[in-house]
Image (cartoon, helix red, strand yellow):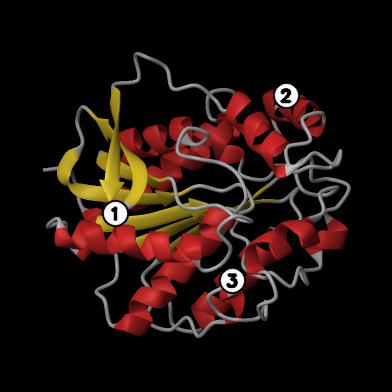
Amino acid sequence: MASLQAALLDRYVRRLHLFGEDGADVATLRRRIERVAPPVLPWSGVRVSPVEAGGVPGEWAVPKAAGADRVLLYLHGGGWIMGSPRTHRSLVAGLARGAGVRALSLDYRLAPEHPFPAALDDGVAAYDWLLASGFEPGRIVIAGDSAGGNLALAVLLRLRDAGTPLPAGAVLLSPATDLGLAGASHTTRRALDPYLARADLEAIVAAYAGTRDRAEPYLSPLFADLHGLPPMLIHVGDHEVLLDDAVRLGERALAAGVEARTVVWPGMMHVFQNLAPFVPEARRANREIAAFVRSRVGAAA
């Protein structure tokens, strides 16, 4: 059973219309998500500073005890049309602190102004910049939530296909892996999902994918050949329409010989990990994520 805090936030989130259930335009949605972003407490011990990573803006989140050579590369969610490092700063800073790494959170280009593959290109450019800056692939973990989880997977596929050394692991939180929206959970979890159930996901996907074939592997990584990808930790809530996107990805990754662990969190909403200041399940999930990152990159120097 979900905690009381999670249940109360479920009610609150249903009133926010963060994905445009009320017909709001993209500019309004962007303002909304920025306004409700969880805060980074001033005593958190994480220093945040702007950075240009291969021409892509972003920010470093560096805890006091972070290993100088260990990096979490993070791609935020928001349906490819909204969100920023600021909206995910609390989550990213908390993961960086828990794992003892520095985090690079990207402010990649958003649709519809910059449709596919702009955001994917930005993710690849930032990873290449990390390598050019002297960070070793084995000391990097890539992560993302929702649309950012889609991008993190697509970045891995692009890197593998280009012969670029891959990072040590991937953390995927409620990743959108099937842009055809064919997962059964789009129906079975519709009444339970406070974020996405009433959103026009078709319009959101169209803003990003345009007229491209949505089964393309870099758009829908669920249908990609996943062989050779690094170990993955996949988290998803049982109360979200993207449940099957995550579960099917885990199954296909294992079938392709990829080390993958999928954790379905009972009673949890979409990207509940971003609610760690308020929800105990999110804090437990983030400790598990931090432990996975540490296991992949090693202890801080």
At label 3, the amino acid type is Leu
Position above or below: 271 against 155: above
- Labels 3 and 1: the sequence-earlier one: 3
Q: Which amino acid does label 1 sit on?
A: Ser
> Looking at the image, is 108 positioned above or below residue 276?
below
Q: Which residue is drawn at 37% across and 14% down?
A: 42
Q: Position of residue 185 (x, y in %)?
A: 79, 62
The reply, left or right, for residue 207 in relation to residue 201 is: left
> Residue at label 2?
4
Q: At x 70% / y 43%, what residue is drawn?
A: 26
Q: What residue type is labelled 2?
A: Leu
Q: Pointer 1: what residue? A: 295
Tag 2, which secondary structure?
helix
Q: Which residue is drawn at 14% across and 55% down?
A: 133
| Residue 67 picture quarter | top left
The mark found on residue 80 in the picture is none
In this view, the residue in front, 249 or 83, is 83
Q: In which quarter of the image is residue 195?
A: top right
Crowding near the residue tagged with mark 2, few <14, some 14–19, many ≥20 C-alpha atoms within 10 Å: few
Looking at the picture, how far across and down is residue 44, in whole percent? 35, 20
Residue placed most toward the observer, 222 or 244: 222
Residue drawn at x 64%, y 52% is: 79
Q: Dot 3 surroundings within 10 Å: few (below 14), some, or many (20 or more)? A: many
Query: In this rendering, which labeled residue sits more in front, label 3 or label 1?
Result: 3
- Structural crowding at the residue carrying mark 1, measured as other residues with C-alpha within 10 Å and reported as few (<14), some (14–19) or many (≥20): few
Q: What whole-number distance in Å separates the C-alpha atoms at marks 3 and 1?
A: 22 Å
- Asked if one can make out residue 173 in the rendered structure from this viewpoint, the answer is no
* First in sequence: mark 1 vs mark 2: 2
Q: Distance between the residues labelled 1 and 2?
A: 32 Å
In screen coordinates, is 67 left or right of 89? left
Q: Quadrant of the N terminus?
A: top right
Q: Is residue 284 visible?
A: yes
